[in-house]
Amino acid sequence: MLEDSLLNKSSLNFLESYLNNAAPTGYEWEGQKLWMNYLKPYVDSFITDTYGTAVGVINPDAPFKVVIEGHADEISWYVNYINEDGLIHVIRNGGSDHMIAASKRVNIHTKNGIVKGVFGWPAIHTRDKSNEEHPKLENITIDVGCTTKEEVEKLGVHVGCVITYPDEFFILNENKFVCRALDNRMGGFMIAEVARLLKENKVELPFGLYITNSVQEEIGLRGAEMITQRIKPNVAIVTDVTHDTTTPMIDKKKEGETKIGDGPVISYAPAVQNKLREMIIDTATEKNIPFQRAAVSRATGTDTDAFAYSNGGVASALISLPLRYMHTTVEMVHRDDVENVIKLIYESLLKIKNGETFNYFD
């Protein structure tokens, strides 16, 4: 029986250090090292690949393989052009939001270390009130305090340097976790907590469990595409974030209704295997774990799609963590939802039978 409150001091210390570490798409390895170090006592072995996906394995010799998965990368920017006045123009690395960039502090990652900068924006006094321009990719620039291109280059900044926001983890009103990159390092954190609970509760699984922290989800599910071919799983339970649609300017008729604090979100989508999903719903009901439902017209836009359509078809399901303000520096989730996602994945694993592929025709 799981405790009502799952997260201990060690868990929260790891979460804070994991979130505060930058892990932009294509540069996830330092975060992966932190994650593997935390996971090490709870798994039998690790798999890593050349692009940085990390997998902790329990029962590596078992022929039947179950994956629980999150992704490790965060959105960022690339230096694209440095003008003669020393201002830096950028392009996206993942789904970075130009609308929030103006006046944000940034870290530019160079071989010489971090170079600090700011996304500048014209003062309200100087703007044309009759024809206000909004931030867009073409007009946002980073100022690193230099006045020439040569000065910028002497700092070690060049085209291709990756840029992240420095905003760090904090807790708002006792139970709201706030940080950049909760999408989706919360997923990596939650699956690591599942592994911890399995170890601490001395659970003997009848199958191999592959706790998978994939890279490069933000630019097209690429890490999951690679690692699923290596693991060749029989079942995959993926966790990612999804939108809290109760904040302003979101149309519930279009986006559906989900809310932080109301429980994990279980998705209905073509990539979601129906029998596996229903098993997860039955588990939530049986264990009194609150949950919400969401419908997706086509692709889920998560690593679920990569696992589901690999290796001739893998029974896959998606359990999402509701989140406010996605792809901003103040992403917000509810602690209760985090704990309930962990509980739901944990309890669902205990329901999976060795060799069960959830085939409709069995």
Image (cartoon, rainbow, N blue to C red):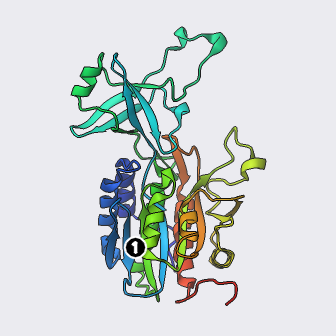
Q: Observer-nearest residue: 79 or 191? A: 79
Residue 190 seen from this side: no
x, y percent for residue 240: 54, 59
Quadrant of image for the C terminus: bottom right
Q: What residue type is labelled 1?
A: Arg
Location of residue 56 by image quarter: bottom left
Q: Farthest front residue?
A: 312
Residue at the (48%, 20%) spot, across then down: 121
x, y percent for residue 150: 25, 21
Residue 167 seen from this side: yes
Q: Observer-nearest residue: 174 or 266? A: 266
Circle 1 crowding by C-alpha within 10 Å: few under 14, some 14–19, many from 20: some
Disc 1: which residue: 196
Location of residue 113 by image quarter: top left
Q: Farthest right residue?
A: 253
Q: In this view, does 359 lie to the left or right of 100?
A: right
x, y percent for residue 239: 54, 64
Residue at the (34%, 16%) spot, across then down: 85
Q: Is residue 217 left or right of residue 252?
A: left
Residue at the (54%, 52%) spot, across then down: 333
x, y percent for residue 119: 43, 27
